[in-house]
Amino acid sequence: MTVVCVLADPPRPGLVFPDLVDTSPLSEVDVAELYAAALRDVCTAVEGSGGDLLVNYRPDDAIPDEHVPADADAEGEVRDALEPALDAPGEARFEVQVGETFAGRAGNTVTHLLEQEEVASAAVTEPAAAFCSRQEIDEAAMKLRRTPVVLGPSTGGRVYFAGFTDTIDFEGAYTPPALRTLTDRAGDAGHEVDFLNSLPVLETGADLAEALLQVETRRAAGRPVPTHVGDWLDDSGLPVVADGSGGLELAGE
């Protein structure tokens, strides 16, 4: 069984999805609400899969001071965000992140799970991967039975999921383009790599425009969409338009 670690920040305005604030018409409060919705979708996907959910939250002493209010409670805020979404929130496993960078935190968690807890496989994802459903997670678990490293690619060389049955050198492993860097690190460690289907992630205004289009078209085709993000997008009323160069953008940017 794969332990799927969701690296999560408390959904505070200004702290989460900072590039989305800078590249879209959304306010910091809007973006924090979207982050909470995405966190719910990713965690419910893991909970509904054959994997074990581990919520790995960033503690207040590892968050920049400007994003730590007087009444800050990082674990409590993450738990509160997930409480209405998980089937058994009281049984979910929560642990503190350890490490100064995303790659460091991911690497510390995977290494601990594989070497100290001796799990069969461990994976890392994050709220930006809202379109990662239980089907992808179960597919990754199947692939990890045959291949030591399984990656979920996204646009721009990013990854939405990384699963391992053995460790790699994680220092700087998510250096852009993360898809190539992680693949190279796996090769350096003598590991074969397999891939999941490509999915969008939520990090920028362009990503959000793509997500809106994905939700619209998937619904029109009768295909599933991330529930909480889909509801948030419905309420947002954000229109998507062509940007004049073959891409998409949010009207009002």
Image: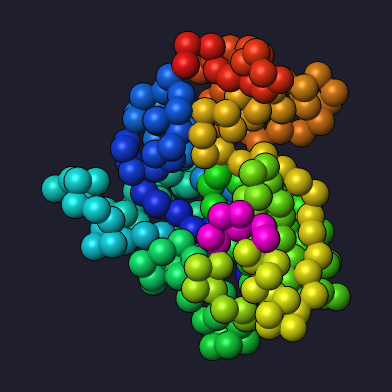
Percent coordinates x, y for residue 29 in the rendering: 34, 29
How many labels, in total?
0
Q: Residue at x 62, y 87 (%)?
A: 118
Describe residue 14's horizontal placement relative to residue 32 as left or right. Answer: left
Q: Residue at x 67, y 58 (%)?
A: 179
> Where's the N terminus, which quadrant?
bottom right
Describe residue 238's horizontal placement relative to residue 24 as left or right. Answer: right
Residue 250's place in the image compared with 177, above or below, is above
Residue 101, image quadrant: bottom left
User: In front: 79, or 134?
Assistant: 134
Residue 219, image quadrant: top right
Give the residue furthest to the left.
Answer: 70
Percent coordinates x, y for residue 204 in the rendering: 51, 34
Whether residue 57 appears in this view of the structure is: yes
Percent coordinates x, y for residue 65 in the rendering: 19, 52
Percent coordinates x, y for residue 44 in the rendering: 61, 48
Residue 14 belongs to magenta span: no
Q: Residue at x 81, y 65 (%)?
A: 194
User: In front: 86, or 234?
Assistant: 234
User: In front: 250, or 93?
Assistant: 250
Extent of the magenta region = 174-180
